[in-house]
Amino acid sequence: MGRIDDLANRYVDEWAPLNPAGATFVGIQGYDDRFEDLSPDGFAAGADLTRRTLSDLSGVEPGSESERVAKEAIEERLGLELARYDAGEVTSEINVISSALHGLRGAFDLMPTDGGDAVHNIASRLNAFPRAIEQLQVTLREAAAQGHVSSRHQMIEVAKQCDIWTDPARDNFFHALADRLDADGALRGELDRGAAASTAATQAFGLFLREELAPLGREKQAAGRERYQLASQYFLGAKIDLDETYAWGFEELARIEGEMRKVAAQIVGSGASIDDAVRALDADPARRIEGKEAFRDWMQSLADKAIGELHGTHFDIPEQIRRIECMIAPTSDGGIYYTGPSEDFSRPGRMWWAVPAGQTEFATWKEVTTVYHEGVPGHHLQVAQTAVRTELLNRYQRLLLWVSGHGEGWALYAERLMEDLGYLADPGDRLGMLDAQAFRAARVIVDIGMHLELEIPRDNPFGFHPGERWTPELGWEFMRGHCRVQDDVLRFELNRYLGWPGQAPSYKVGERIWLQARDDARARKGADFDLKEFHRQALDLGSIGLDPLKAALARL
């Protein structure tokens, strides 16, 4: 490897001690007993590392095409991370899905639990949790004093999450974690003290949000065009025309719903509505599973089957990643997500389901496509294959380089690909895929519309409040009218969009750019175009910004 790869590897070596929870997340060993410094000085140290690395990279010319890709990808990502820090976005971030608080809590989910050393690490981290929370409060205070603050609504919603995580009748997260571990004597005492301290710290943080920070929070939840443009570019790794994309969202949702009506007619009969088909599918006992453990087992079976059948046919799946674990998450926030394998693959890639409180029944027709999105050929193939490619990618590319538009766009592209490959021949499963696509298209409209407070087109295909300006209330009405998601989950989703501007559209917009890249490659290569080769070449670049992706593919 050349100089650029050396700089990238050095960055990882210096980044891990500054980000122990992040190191756990990506599977770098040796940091599981501590947390990062979340004080202003700790955030500043991370920004200094980024600046130094960008400065060093600027003076090095690539010696090969792979180094050129690496340099373009790293500069794009680190440059945007630094821009977000300088804009005060990083140190002020509080929202219901992505913040330093969520990183601290989520780190425990990925830690080994077997053996004395593993349990000791968890105990140490539980006892370190309160200090990290205190540091985070200092940072949020300082950011607010400088005029950088999240919306009041997000603070209150996160405070509610703190209540749920610590409620003995709900998640009771820290005590439940300690109780699951095999320990006695002094180690048991350390675990129990840490669980109590972490619970108290989380409760105190919720109180801090409600009583101290919320009065300083922004009343308006809309990000505005300047903040949104930076957020959109960060999540996509590409600059897009927000107004054109907003208009495209209406066209795309109308197109998908047209497809859904055709499939509904196959399920129920001519003249049937989408909701008629949904009711018929929900009433079919063959398409319902009782109990979250049984549902987890169903997901595992389908994920294993996809890996077995796609390997050697449409993809060459490395041996190290022909295993995925389907997991029930220890919290009830709602949502499904993927976490990658550890660097040495001792921890496999995992598909997680944070089951909403009280949900005991699951409709499989909606979730076949979800398994393909999170598993293979979606996130698991993409993320875990990147981790394997030591001969092609440096350590930063394999472990730290993640772009939402690339990753979520690929996973949504993978759902459609499975239809093309014949895996969604069942009309119910196909309607589930289209419903997921419609959900992502609606998010493009609502996310851009709410944060830019745009006018709703007077000629929109749905006749929805023509000429009015988007508000969170209209966002709720629109999502509820076009998405078949239970209200508590949909409310969480809307809060997520309002607190995390630009991320939700990265799925559908990312898929759009992936499809454009495939069409461009087909046009360039003509009769020589091979779909399997296109997928291999594209994924071998790692998770990179979508503008660098298009540039790299154009050079192949």
Image (tube, helix red, strand yellow):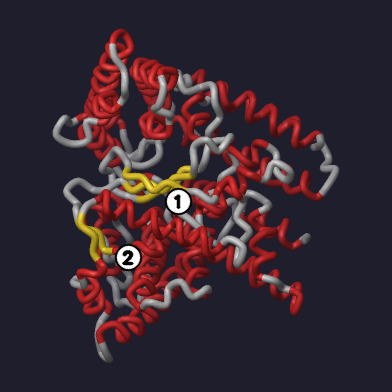
Answer whether labels 2 and 1 touch (C-beta < 8 Å): no
Q: Quadrant of residue 157?
A: top left
Q: Which amino acid does label 1 sit on?
A: Gln
Residue designated by label 2: 366
460 is higher (above) or lower (below) than 499: below
Sequence order check, earlier mark of 2 and 1: 2
Looking at the picture, does residue 417 appear above or below residue 526?
A: above
The residue positioned 35% from the left and 69% from the top of the image is 432
Q: Which residue is drawn at 35% across and 20% down?
A: 126
Please determine whether, in this image, residue 286 is positioned above or below residue 6.
Answer: below
Q: Could you tell me which secondary element the residue under label 1 belongs to?
A: loop
Q: Name the residue under label 1.
A: 503
Left or right, 206 with reference to 51 = left
SS of the residue under disc 2: helix
Report if residue 134 is visible in the image: no
Front residue of this view, candidates 145 and 524: 524
Q: Nearer the viewer, residue 546 or 311?
A: 311
- Foreground mark, 2 or 1, reads 2
Residue 417, position in %: x, y? 52, 69
The picture places residue 471, in percent across and down from the top left corner, at 29, 57
